[in-house]
Amino acid sequence: MNAYELIFWLLTVMAISCALGVILSRNPVSSVLFLIATFFAVSGHYILMNAQFLAIVNIIVYAGAIMVLFLFVIMLMNLNADTEPQKNRLVQLAGVVSGGILFLVILAALKSSTNNMLEQTATDIGLIKNLGKTLFTQFVLPFEIASVLFLSAMIGAVVLGKKGEEEPQTPKGA
Amino acid sequence: MLLLQIDIAFIIEKLILATVILLGSLGIAMYATWGERKVAAIMQDRIGPNRAGPLGLLQPLADGVKLFFKEEIIPDSSTRALFILGPSLAMLTATMTSAVIPWGPDYVTESGRVIALQVADINIGILFVFGVVSLGVYGVMLGGWASNNKFSLLSSIRAAAQAVSYELALGISLVALLMMTGSLSMREIVEQQHGFWADGYFTWNFFKQPLGFLVFLVCTFAELNRAPFDMAECESELNMGYHQEYSSMKLGFYLFAEYINMFISSTVIATLFFGGYNFPFMDEVLASVGPLLFTIICVLVLLTKAIGMILFFMFVRWTLPRFRYDQLMKLGWKTLIPLALFNMLVTGLVILYALN
């Protein structure tokens, strides 16, 4: 076992145990914290694959921004273990069945794959320079379309946010 | 079992460097607390700390001892683990950024060994700084929430909203700088600002990106939670803010993390905009004093610039009154982000048409 494999297994154990922590912990705030730890482990895997840009962007965007908003909502709603509504049996059963099916699919996919561990590759495609060149030459159209998608989501959010503000004023005009 | 095929001397060198940087930033942060009181005193026509040691120079030690010996109180209704995690995270994120800052030029020993005065020269250096900054908000948020106090919660939510809002403008103002330099590595950015004057123009990024610097500076104030943007500890509205329930050294960690953050941010500003360890006529100095002394001068130059920035932070704190929360949000979203976008656009146009 060399250093690469050692780090790989450490990160893998961390990622899986933290992912389990997300769904098993009672307190929603600790779920979010486990999720952040999972993102860190996944970022570690990206670094092992020499994809530094992806690793750091994963941390900035997911751990640094989106999870902060998650925490925001959870803290403001003040969810606690005892206030969590009990789901009825049917919903629980449906959850177990669909989760089980997903598990089966993943198992089948893993069974047919030949190498069960990440290959230590020496590619440079994950470095920011190569990634940027590929994105802006080979994949420029999908890239731009994705940015338009983001723009529309932003405008949608602004429109939704504006609505609540204008509502009290409408009776005056009407 | 072959573990790491890295030179042992390399590891020892990096360990020593990291320890020195950590202790150095702790020491400077300690004396920044003393400096802040002296600056405040001078600006308000008072004397300031003058009891412990000459000029009150032992005051930071006295404060530290006091905080260590205070009774440790963890409220019954708090979430214990997160209550402890909060200040630890604040401290961790405050010290992490120092890893990618180049503190001086490479020093080549007699035997030809190159010692880099930088813990890690990664090719995503700036993004690393940005990532750590974006994680910095967790310390405040977790501490405020785990205290189970409404004032703490409100204050931590304010702080988080503020940090997330200003990160955007901070990032966009950096993009313009990166377009100029064409590299994300901190060392590369510093190397490009070599000396002071070259090819008929200043080499420091401050003169190339004045608007970007302004936006970056204002955003840094907000990210540091320093006056005039210290919404998180707005006494008149929120009692003491997110650390209201904290006592003893945990409170000390929160307060201290602010000063470490201030030192590291000042160094980052000096590195990105004021040429880092570069200074005018450095080639002539190198030729006359030899490499060892030159390296020391370079480190001192960087520290001088950083301390100058810290003093600037302090002057601003004791000059400007605190913003109101809605003014803060308006400034961030409606002024700084459009300004940063405009700056990015102009930079792009200049690079495309004027420089090519």
Image (cartoon, coloured by chain):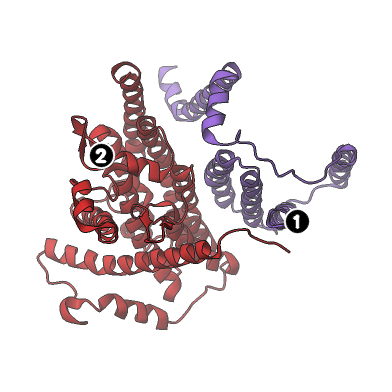
Give the CA separation, mark 1 to mark 2. Answer: 53 Å
Of A151 and B287, which appears nearest the observer? B287
Image-quadrant location for residue B336? top left
Pointer 1 chain: A
Toward the front, the furthest residue is B111
In the current view of this chain or complex, which residue is farthest to the left?
B45
Figure colour of chain A: purple
Q: Can you give x and y, in whole percent of width and height, for residue A81 in the image?
A: 69, 58
Residue B78 placed where, x, y %?
A: 56, 68
Query: Can the viewer see residue B234 in this picture?
Result: no
Give the percent coordinates (x, y) of residue A122. Answer: 65, 40
Q: Please state which amino acid type lies under the numbered disc 2.
A: Trp
Q: Which label belongs to residue A24?
A: 1
- Displayed quadrant of residue A104: top right
Identify which residue, B340 or B103, lies in the foreground.
B103
User: In this structure image, what is the colour of chain B?
Assistant: red
Considering only vertical position in the picture, is A121 above or below B84?
Answer: above
Q: Residue at the location (38% across, 52% down)?
A: B102
Disc 2 crowd, CA 10 A, few/some/many (<14, 14-19, 20+)? many
Q: Which residue is mark 2?
A: B204
